[in-house]
Image (cartoon, grey):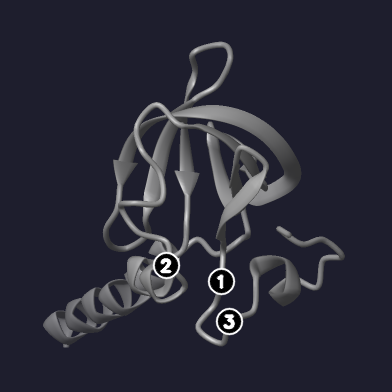
Amino acid sequence: MRSMKKCFATLALITATPVLAHHGWGFYGEIVELQFTVAELKLGNPHDRVVATDGEHRRWNLLLAPPARNRRFGFDEDTLSVGDVIDVTGAKHSRKLEIKVHCIGVDGVNVYTYRYDNGKSSFERLRMDQSCE
């Protein structure tokens, strides 16, 4: 009986871990518009990321959609380069230097929009009255 309880406890922990690991938009609140310089591109699962520095040389993690979705909607390793100055609109994490990105612009042109599988932007999905265009 005791080993059965351990088994159920382990199973519960294993099945709950993916849910806890996926963050959604929960810890991201304040919408910010900031300018950064791209320091690194980290394109891959579970989410594409851009590591960028602000005017005070702080390193920020800019979290994008999953890679397959980004490629489907035209964002890939050729979209941005290290050294590019980017304008980012996104939701700032409540406790760390991280932004879940809604939009990225370069020289006044939108080059990235966070999109879902159905093509809706994150603004549309969250029913926000904003757009990247």
Residue 51 location (% of width, % of height): 40, 35
Q: The residue tagged with tag 1: helix, strand or loop?
A: loop
Q: Could you tell me which residue is drawn at 80 percent across and 73 percent down?
A: 127
Q: Position of residue 79 (x, y in %)?
A: 40, 51
Q: Nearer the viewer, residue 117 or 11?
A: 117
How far is disc 1 from disc 3 in space, using C-alphas?
A: 6 Å
- Specify the quadrant of the image occupied by residue 119: bottom right
Going by the numbered disc 3, the residue's amino acid type is: Gly
Residue 75, quarter of the rendered image: bottom left
- Answer with the quarter of the image where residue 39 lies: top left
Would you name the residue on which mark 1 appears? Answer: 115
Q: Residues within 10 Å of mark 2 (few under 14, many from 20)?
A: many
Q: Position of residue 29 (x, y in %)?
A: 72, 49
Residue receiving disc 3: 119
Q: Amino acid at mark 2?
A: Asn
Look at the picture and state if 81 lies above or below 44.
above
CA–CA distance in space, label 1 to label 2: 8 Å
Residue under pointer 2:
70
Q: Residue at x 64, y 79 (%)?
A: 120
What's the residue at 55%, 21% (across, down)? 54
Say which amino acid is labelled 1: Arg
Seen at 35% across and 32% down, the residue is: 82
Which mark sits nearer the N-terminus, 3 or 2? 2
Q: Contact, CB < 8 Å: mark 1 with mark 3?
A: yes
